[in-house]
Amino acid sequence: MADKEALEATPAKGDESIPAPKTKSEAKAIINKMLEKLQKMDDQKHGGARSRLPKARMLDASALESKDPEHHYCYVNTDDEGNLQGHADDGYVAVPEKEAEAAGVRVHVGETRLMRVPRKVYEEKMDESKRLNDSRLKAHRAEVREAVAAVHRELQKRGYDIPLERLLVDE
């Protein structure tokens, strides 16, 4: 029984008891200390330097994305008409100004315009892009394999019996 009471009285590992603040300044000091600790934990979790660029904050449409997870939002450069038309062809539409303002997001930032597309269309486009990139990365391997096979055939014609796998270096 005494062991059970001792176990309950012992704080769990990592559990720090915080004394109740007696004054407002003590409460602020405790809150600031906790904020610093949380910030340190966040910095360890998310590597790299924090973005201090105002452009990163200006082009942040996460408030809209959190309210409307069914769409993907991005800013499109309107200086290049082909870029704007390409996005429109891919299904992007301009976000109404009232909707963006209600979420606290800017519609125009310099030459850019906030646009959105259904998330399903966006994910299909990203999957297609990944498949294309993978095929491009693997294409050179097929070409190398064909060239090595030609060398292998030529060596066999000249009387050398070297296995194809030995000629082919696989990364």
Image: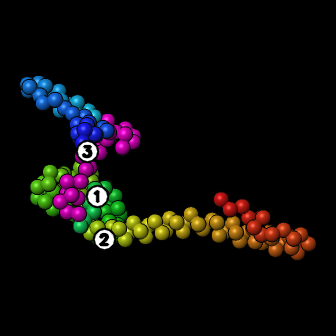
Q: Amino acid at mark 1?
A: Cys
Q: Is residue 123 above or below residue 63?
A: below
**Whole-number angstrom distance, CA of label 1 to CA of label 2:** 15 Å
Q: Amino acid at mark 3?
A: Arg
Q: Nearer the viewer, residue 33 or 53?
A: 33
Q: Position of residue 7 (x, y in %)?
A: 27, 40
Q: Which residue of the protein is positioned furthest toward the left in this rendering?
A: 23
| First in sequence: mark 2 vs mark 3 | 3
The magenta span reads 40-69
Considering the numbered disc 2 on the image, is that residue within a helix, a strand or a loop?
helix
User: Which quadrant of the view contains residue 21?
Assistant: top left
Residue at 23% across, 30% down? 33
User: Which quadrant of the view contains residue 165?
Assistant: bottom right
**Whole-number angstrom distance, CA of label 2 to CA of label 3:** 26 Å
Q: Is residue 169 above or below residue 149?
A: above
Considering the numbered disc 1 on the image, is that residue within a helix, a strand or a loop?
strand
Q: Amino acid at mark 2?
A: Lys
- Mark number displayed over residue 57: 3
- Mark number displayed over residue 118: none
Q: Position of residue 38 (x, y in %)?
A: 27, 38
Considering the numbered disc 3 on the image, is that residue within a helix, a strand or a loop?
helix
Q: How many residues crowd around disc 3 within 10 Å: few (fewer than 14), some, or many (20 or more)?
A: few
Residue at 43% across, 70% down? 128
Q: Which residue of the protein is positioned furthest toward the front in this rendering?
A: 1
- Mark number displayed over residue 74: 1
Q: Is residue 105 above or below residue 36?
A: below
| First in sequence: mark 3 vs mark 1 | 3
Location of mark 2 (residue): 120
